[in-house]
């Protein structure tokens, strides 16, 4: 069973020995391994049960390091990095050959991000390789936002969980690429599109849900609880499902249900994002027979929340 603790040295030694360590970030916990070591990368895919066609993000300690792993970095990318790194933003950049094929699933780009969590930043400074880290959950399930979430699901398969407390943002990074120089968002996330556009102007959105495995990061079923989940208008859904059977996930309103989680009683989208994945886990572990969730306002972080809700409901 994994040990949980705050020992950066221990994490460093395990990673240097080719082992995996769960690491805290501001978005969600990651399942980290040496991104330059194909054996460590293979372990990540095995432990997560992740298909090999789905590429991994690598994590670095600062923007300077991206030059070691990527070529022809567009000005828009460096502008975004100086505005938002460390932070919940992943940049898709032209990969250098030092990055193993396994990491990028053979794609010509590599996803790079500089996470904003003090423990993981210290760890990244202590090791002399980048850390490949997908979210630390079994493939397709809800991402972990506490060390306990990681221990529950992957604890038997990894030696160490670096304990950085609950994640401050609670939803994965926003992924931005630059095909033909055009800023393009592939996954909405913890950095608002409005903020990105403030720095590089209008971006394109390519976040259409897809069942096509050739469109990484866009699988239509993802972030999903095991229970049946339906997302929509709660008043309508409640007319179809009796309250005692339903677990209710509401944004702000109290539906007086016996099994109900309100994401943010004050209607704050950041608070809702922070609570989203724990709430889904709690309802999945509850006695509810079905999870009924309502969409939140589709602005700011609300876009990323709604994206996760619709994928969670799509299984
Ligand atoms: O916030 C986050 O990004 C977290 C923390 C741990 O950093 N990581 C994370 O990793 O969410 P993961 O593997 O669960 O999701 C990364 C997504 C995947 O859907 C993958 O398909 C996509 O990023 N991705 C990675 N590299 C890509 C590439 N070169 N081109 C297109 N999509 C890519
Ligand atoms: Mg994930």
Image (cartoon, helix red, strand yellow):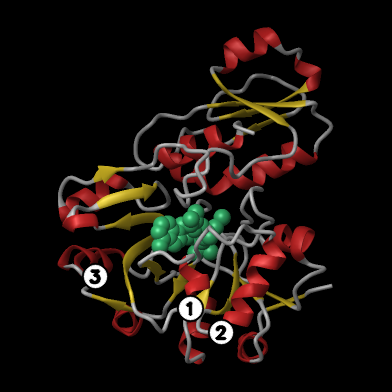
Quarter holding the N terminus is: bottom right
Residue at image coords 54%, 78%:
119
User: Which numbered mark, 3 or 2, is in the foreground of this view?
Assistant: 2
| Image position of 30 (left or right of 107) | right
Question: Residue 54: x, y in percent?
Answer: 53, 58
The residue at which mark 3 appears reads as 82
Could you say whether the residue bearing mark 1 is in a helix, strand or loop? Answer: loop
- Give how far apart the Cα atoms at labels 3 and 2 are: 28 Å
Q: Earlier in the sequence, mark 2 or mark 1?
A: 2
Could you say whether the residue bearing mark 3 is in a helix, strand or loop? Answer: helix
Question: Residue 278: x, y in percent?
Answer: 65, 47
In the displayed structure, would residue 53 be above or below residue 119? above
Is residue 4 visible to the viewer in this orientation of the structure? Answer: yes
Q: Earlier in the sequence, mark 1 or mark 3?
A: 3
- Give how far apart the Cα atoms at labels 2 and 1 are: 8 Å
Question: Residue 289: x, y in percent?
Answer: 80, 26
| Image position of 204 (left or right of 215) | left
**Which quadrant would residue 23 be assigned to in this image?**
bottom right
The residue at which mark 2 appears reads as 37
| Image position of 149 (left or right of 288) | left
Label tally: 3
The residue at which mark 1 appears reads as 100
Q: Is mark 3 within 8 Å of ligand 1?
A: no
């Amino acid at each position: 069973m994994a040990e949980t603790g705050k020992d950066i040295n221990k994490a460093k030694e395990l990673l240097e020995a080719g082992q995996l360590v769960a690491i805290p970030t501001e978005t969600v916990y990651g399942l980290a391994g040496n991104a330059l070591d194909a054996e460590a990368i293979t372990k990540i895919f095995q432990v997560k049960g992740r298909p090999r066609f789905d590429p991994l993000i690598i994590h670095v300690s600062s923007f300077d390091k991206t030059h070691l792993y990527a070529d022809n970095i567009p000005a828009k990318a460096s502008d975004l990095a100086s505005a938002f790194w460390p932070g919940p933003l992943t940049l898709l950049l032209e990969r250098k050959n030092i990055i193993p094929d396994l990491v990028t699933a053979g794609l010509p780009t590599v996803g790079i991000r500089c996470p904003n969590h003090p423990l993981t930043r210290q760890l990244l400074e202590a090791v002399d390789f980048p850390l490949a880290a997908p979210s630390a959950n079994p493939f397709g399930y809800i991402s972990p936002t506490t060390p306990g979430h990681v221990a529950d699901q992957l604890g038997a398969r990894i030696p160490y969980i670096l304990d950085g407390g609950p994640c401050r943002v609670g939803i994965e990074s926003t992924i931005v690429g630059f095909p033909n120089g055009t800023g393009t968002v592939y996954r909405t996330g913890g950095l608002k599109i409005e903020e990105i556009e403030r720095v590089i102007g209008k971006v394109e959105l390519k976040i259409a849900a897809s069942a096509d495995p050739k469109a990484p990061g866009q699988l239509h079923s993802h972030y999903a609880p095991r229970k049946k989940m339906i997302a929509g208008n709660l008043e309508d859904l409640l007319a179809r499902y009796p309250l005692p059977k339903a677990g209710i996930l509401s944004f702000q309103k109290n539906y007086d249900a016996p099994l109900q989680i309100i994401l943010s009683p004050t209607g704050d989208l950041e608070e809702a994002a922070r609570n989203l994945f724990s709430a889904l886990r709690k309802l999945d572990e509850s006695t509810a027979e079905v999870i009924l969730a309502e969409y939140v306002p589709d602005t700011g972080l609300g876009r990323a929340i709604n994206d996760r809700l619709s994928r969670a409901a799509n299984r």
